[in-house]
Image (tube, helix red, strand yellow):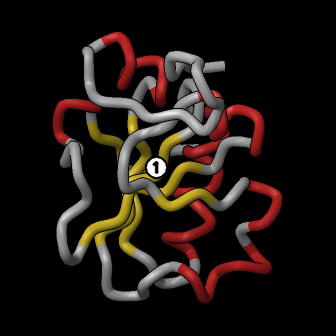
Amino acid sequence: MQVPEVQVDEVPVQPTEGSVLLDVREDDEWQAGHAPGALHIPMGDIMARLSELPEDADVYVICRTGGRSARVTAFLNDNGWDAVNVSGGMQAWASTGRPMVGEQSGAEPRVL
């Protein structure tokens, strides 16, 4: 499966008007740590929650390492969105020192 892909340093740290960083990881992964301003829709919920994705936005899709996000990217592109997979996922995001926030009180954000 060939999908459009960008390196993590090509993704805006904070999504701008006209772009969305879509995190498709599971709830526990999201709660442990995610990019600030990202939209969280787990991969299994994408079809039911498509209305939450702006149709005219550039969509950067991210997961832990890039596998799930590649599948979601292909699905979105087949259905009219302009989506790209973030190569290396949240592991690459964290390893390059990009900002992260978590939902677990008192715990440092981390990638599960």
Give the number of callouts: 1
Q: Is residue 43 above or below residue 8?
A: below
Give the residue at x 19% y 75%: 17
Q: Secondary structure at mark 1?
A: loop
Check disc 1: other Cα within 10 Å, few if <14, some if 14-19, many if 20+. Answer: some
Residue 18 as seen in the image, left or right of residue 35: left
Name the spot of residue 79 as percent of width and height, x first.
57, 81
User: Which residue is under mark 1?
Assistant: 3
Residue in the foreground of this view, choosing between 32 and 43: 32
Residue in the foreground of this view, choosing between 53 and 37: 37
Residue 3 as seen in the image, left or right of residue 25: left
Give the residue at x 49% y 70%: 77
Amino acid type of the residue that numbered disc 1 sits on in the rendered structure: Val
Residue in the foreground of this view, choosing between 58 and 94: 94
Name the spot of residue 31 as percent of width and height, x first.
66, 37
Q: Is residue 3 above or below residue 65?
A: below
Give the residue at x 50% y 61%: 39
Give the residue at x 66% y 19%: 112
Q: Is residue 21 above or below residue 36?
A: below
Residue 32 as seen in the image, left or right of residue 36: right
Q: Quadrant of residue 46?
A: bottom right
Name the spot of residue 60 as percent of width and height, x first.
38, 54
Name the spot of residue 91 as percent of width and height, x first.
48, 18
Q: Residue furthest top?
A: 95
Q: Is residue 97 above or below residue 12?
A: above
Quarter holding the N terminus is: top right
Q: Quadrant of residue 32?
A: top right
